[in-house]
């Protein structure tokens, strides 16, 4: 297991390098940050000075080399729009995003697994049909629409939750529910299928033959075996959730890194975008690693090699 | 497949989860303090005055003042300077307000003016508004309350440019540096900095010793709410008292709701459809005139801008701008006449063309382009709408190829100079060229005689009206909404919040 973790950690810099390179090239070839920052009122001299400062007069591979050399030393460069170092700007926005994603993931996972179990237990009954339909409907609802619908119901009609912003735990409810709806249906359907398959296994029949209570069978024997594919899926969802959080952050005025990233992409503010992509990518890799380790702990059949 | 006993297990579990999730009572407001909360559309990610975008300046000007104050209607009045006069063609003398104190109690003097402007003019420094004042040669302190600004050439727009430049304390600059000033801004403004959460909120406290009198409210919270529908919801829920940039489709909703109202004003942005006059068919002035007749501007204004904003009077400048020519009128909507002129110009069956626009840069920009396209189709001109992203747009600007027609808004901030420059050759943005226009533009820029300048701009507006390098559409509105019990605040034409006298009944 130690070898496995060591090897995975060794691969992190390579993944980050590839991601950084792709982001860098895409940003550079689709727009000129100097033109956008200085605007149409700029003089050619101003443009030339700034281009030289940012090494934009160099060929693209050289630009990337200069950039990556600084990054290795922990310097992601200075944001052109804000005239301040990029990484601190990103890090101060990372906390709210992680909070939102964690809350969304918890709701999606626990809610999804519970509903999925309910479907499996009442397979082919009305509640199964209702929950499955709800899951499919939820999956097809765009989050900006759902978010505004929730604001209308809970903030304007019922007046029990704030519309947007941060401050109290109530502020977290609507955005995290909106975000969770993005992936909860997958958890429901996956758990349902996995449970229905597992209950036909021999050891469940044996357990029942021993006279164990149905509740004990469900939580002691079925759950640990059926939950595996759901957990692997969870690891894969971090990226999707962070992507989805951009829309949720915008609707609910949540001060996360997604919004910072979108604004910076439009400005071709390369240092901020790369710093954000870097941090988000790192978060996804680490969370996948944690899920893998966790999987091997609850299911000893999985050997991490 | 499971027995009835097992079926109840998930229900029990669900009950536990639900019990934990039951919501507590809604949050209670602070009754004793008067807190004004604003829902802003855009936020900078730094409070540094160097950013100099309107969004940044709107926050900066809560804690700072400018020498010359610009008002909601784009007029100018006294700020930290009480008097300014040209000494000669290139020297302006400013008399400063006496007894003004920064938030830390230190007095504001001419040394602060010099320090602020010297920093901006330093070739090494990055400062957004720098290009507005680069014609300043140097700043000289005459005495504690008198400053001379010496310009390289006659510089008539200096006064207006200074209304965008916050005066910052020299002693604080020396003590904490530019980074420190961005972290904890300090100035002479009506509000003191309290807290800044990037992407979320700026919190301010009333400055009791403000030279213009203490503000009416105790605290101000400016929140960034990027989504228009959410901003409107926050106003309806009573969380905010003022919101910026009301989405056009939600205007009726606010108008129909009690306790809230729309507050709109004409901005100084003139929206125009500019044609590439270098190439056929738009090299023919007749064709350009025909397009002006073919577009039903009042209808678009009513439908796409819900009647907010104004019709440009056949010229680039909005009516609140110095240089606006009151004698000009827009061409009426007359598709028959348009067809007839097109036929005379050799296009009896029209032609194919395209309109380049960005999405969300100007109010209803894509909708307006689509409406224009539909109207042009009626006179035989088939115009496709080409929506491009900002980065692509700026590449097209650089390549000087925006397509046959492109939509653009030019702001003037109240002085013709800032907007008229875009129809001159050196701006790099004009396809059309008029020697007389160029000459007049330079004349208006090289004198501090207001009457001469006005005459020049009036003639320039006539030339634009005769030659139609663009179809001049609308003076775009700034659309705000506010709680009806908020007084002492009006919508600004330049999108800068002026909250000093705002008060809740």
Image: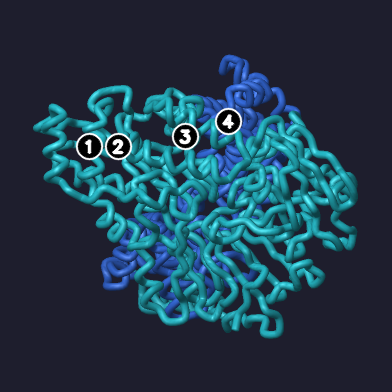
Give the spatial CA distance, label 1 vs label 3: 24 Å
- Decide: few, some or many residues near mark 1? Use Cα within 10 Å; few <14, some 14-19, many ≥20: many
Residue that numbered label 2 is attached to? B355
Foreground mark, 1 or 4, reads 4
Chain of the residue where label 4 is placed in the rendered structure: A
Chain of the residue where label 2 is placed in the rendered structure: B
The residue drawn where x is 56% and y is 26% is A21
Mark yes or no: residue A236 visible.
no
Give the spatial CA distance, label 3 vs label 4: 12 Å
The residue drawn where x is 84% and y is 46% is B173
Q: A305 above or below A256? A: above
- Decide: few, some or many residues near mark 3? Use Cα within 10 Å; few <14, some 14-19, many ≥20: some
> Do tags 2 and 3 sit on the same chain?
yes
- Decide: few, some or many residues near mark 4? Use Cα within 10 Å; few <14, some 14-19, many ≥20: some
Foreground mark, 4 or 2, reads 4
Q: Foreground: A81 or A144?
A: A81
Mark yes or no: residue A140 visible.
yes
- Where residue B159 appears, x then y in whole percent? 66, 47
Point out the tag, 2 or 3, that comes first from the N-terminus: 2
Residue that numbered label 1 is attached to? B383
Q: Colour of chain B?
A: cyan
- Where residue B376 appears, x then y in whole percent? 19, 42
The residue drawn where x is 31% and y is 61% is A137
Q: Left or right of B169: which side holds B349?
A: left
Give the spatial CA distance, label 4 vs label 2: 25 Å
Residue that numbered label 4 is attached to? A42
């Amino acid at each position: 297991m130690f070898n496995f973790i060591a090897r995975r950690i060794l691969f992190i810099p390579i993944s980050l390098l590839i991601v950084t390179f792709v982001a860098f090239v895409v940003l550079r070839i689709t727009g000129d940050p100097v033109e956008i920052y200085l605007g149409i009122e700029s003089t050619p001299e101003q443009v030339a000075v700034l281009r030289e400062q940012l090494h934009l007069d160099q060929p693209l591979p050289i630009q990337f080399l200069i950039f990556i050399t600084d990054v290795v030393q922990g310097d992601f460069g200075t944001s052109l729009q804000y005239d301040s170092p990029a990484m601190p700007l990103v890090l101060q926005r990372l906390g709210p995003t992680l909070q939102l994603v964690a809350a969304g993931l918890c709701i999606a996972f626990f809610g999804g697994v519970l509903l999925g179990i309910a479907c499996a237990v009442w397979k082919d009954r009305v509640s199964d049909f209702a929950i499955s339909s709800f899951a499919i409907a939820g999956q097809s609802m765009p989050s900006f629409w759902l978010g505004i619908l929730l604001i209308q119901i809970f903030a304007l009609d019922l007046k029990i939750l704030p519309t947007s912003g941060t401050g109290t735990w109530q502020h977290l409810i609507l955005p995290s529910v909106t975000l969770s709806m993005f992936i909860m249906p997958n958890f429901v359907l996956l758990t349902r299928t996995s449970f229905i398959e597992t209950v036909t296994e021999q050891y469940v029949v044996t357990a029942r033959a021993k006279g164990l209570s149905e509740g004990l069978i469900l939580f002691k024997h079925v759950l640990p075996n059926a939950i595996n594919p759901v957990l692997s899926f969870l690891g894969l969802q971090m990226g999707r959730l962070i992507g989805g959080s951009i829309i949720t952050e915008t609707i609910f005025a949540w001060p996360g890194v997604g919004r910072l990233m979108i604004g910076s992409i439009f400005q071709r503010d390369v240092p901020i975008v790369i710093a954000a992509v870097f941090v988000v990518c790192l978060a996804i890799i680490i969370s996948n690693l944690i899920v893998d380790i966790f999987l091997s702990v609850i299911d000893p059949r999985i050997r991490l090699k | 497949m499971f027995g009835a006993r097992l079926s109840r297990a998930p229900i029990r579990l669900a009950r536990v989860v639900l019990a934990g999730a039951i919501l507590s009572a809604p949050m209670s407001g602070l009754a004793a303090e008067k807190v004004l909360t604003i829902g802003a559309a855009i936020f900078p990610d730094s409070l540094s005055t160097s950013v100099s975008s309107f969004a940044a300046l709107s926050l900066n000007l809560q804690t700072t003042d400018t020498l010359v104050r610009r008002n909601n209607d784009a007029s100018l009045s006294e700020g930290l300077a009480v008097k300014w006069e040209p000494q000669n063609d290139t020297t302006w003398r400013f008399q400063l307000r006496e007894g003004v104190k920064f938030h830390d109690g230190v007095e504001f003097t001419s040394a602060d003016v010099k320090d602020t402007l010297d920093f901006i003019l330093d070739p090494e420094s990055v400062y957004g508004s720098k290009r507005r004042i680069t014609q300043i040669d140097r700043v000289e302190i005459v005495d504690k309350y008198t400053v001379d600004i010496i310009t390289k050439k006659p510089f008539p727009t200096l006064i207006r440019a200074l209304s965008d430049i916050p005066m910052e304390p020299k002693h604080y600059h020396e003590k904490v540096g530019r980074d420190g000033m961005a972290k904890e801004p300090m100035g002479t403004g009506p509000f003191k900095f309290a807290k800044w959460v990037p992407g979320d909120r700026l919190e301010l406290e009333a400055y009791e010793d403000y030279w213009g009198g203490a503000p009416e409210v105790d605290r101000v919270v400016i929140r960034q709410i990027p989504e228009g529908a959410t901003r409107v919801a926050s106003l309806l829920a009573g969380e905010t008292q003022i919101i910026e940039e009301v989405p056009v489709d939600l205007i009726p909703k606010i108008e129909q709701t009690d306790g809230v109202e729309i507050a709109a004003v004409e901005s100084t942005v003139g929206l125009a459809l500019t044609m590439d006059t270098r190439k056929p068919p738009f090299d023919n002035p007749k064709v350009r005139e025909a397009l002006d007749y073919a577009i039903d501007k009042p209808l678009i204004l009513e439908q796409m801008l819900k009647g907010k904003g104004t019709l440009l009077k056949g010229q680039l400048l909005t009516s609140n701008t110095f240089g606006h020519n009151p004698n000009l009128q827009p061409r009426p909507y007359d598709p028959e006449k348009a067809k007839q002129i097109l036929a005379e110009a050799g296009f009896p069956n029209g032609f194919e063309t395209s309109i380049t626009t960005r999405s969300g840069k100007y109010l209803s920009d894509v909708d307006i382009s689509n409406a224009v396209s539909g109207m042009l189709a009626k006179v035989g001109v088939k115009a496709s709408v080409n929506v491009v992203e900002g980065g692509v747009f700026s590449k097209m600007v650089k390549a000087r190829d925006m397509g046959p027609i492109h939509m653009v808004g030019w702001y003037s901030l109240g002085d013709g100079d800032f907007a008229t420059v875009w129809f001159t050759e050196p701006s790099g943005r004009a396809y059309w060229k008029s020697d007389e226009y160029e000459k007049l533009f330079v004349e208006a820029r090289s004198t501090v005689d207001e009457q001469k300048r006005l005459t020049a701009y009036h003639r320039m507006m006539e030339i634009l009206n005769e030659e139609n390098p663009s179809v001049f559409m609308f003076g775009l509105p700034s659309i705000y909404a506010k709680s009806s019990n908020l007084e002492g605040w009006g919508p600004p034409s330049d999108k800068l919040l002026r909250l000093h006298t705002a008060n809740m009944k």
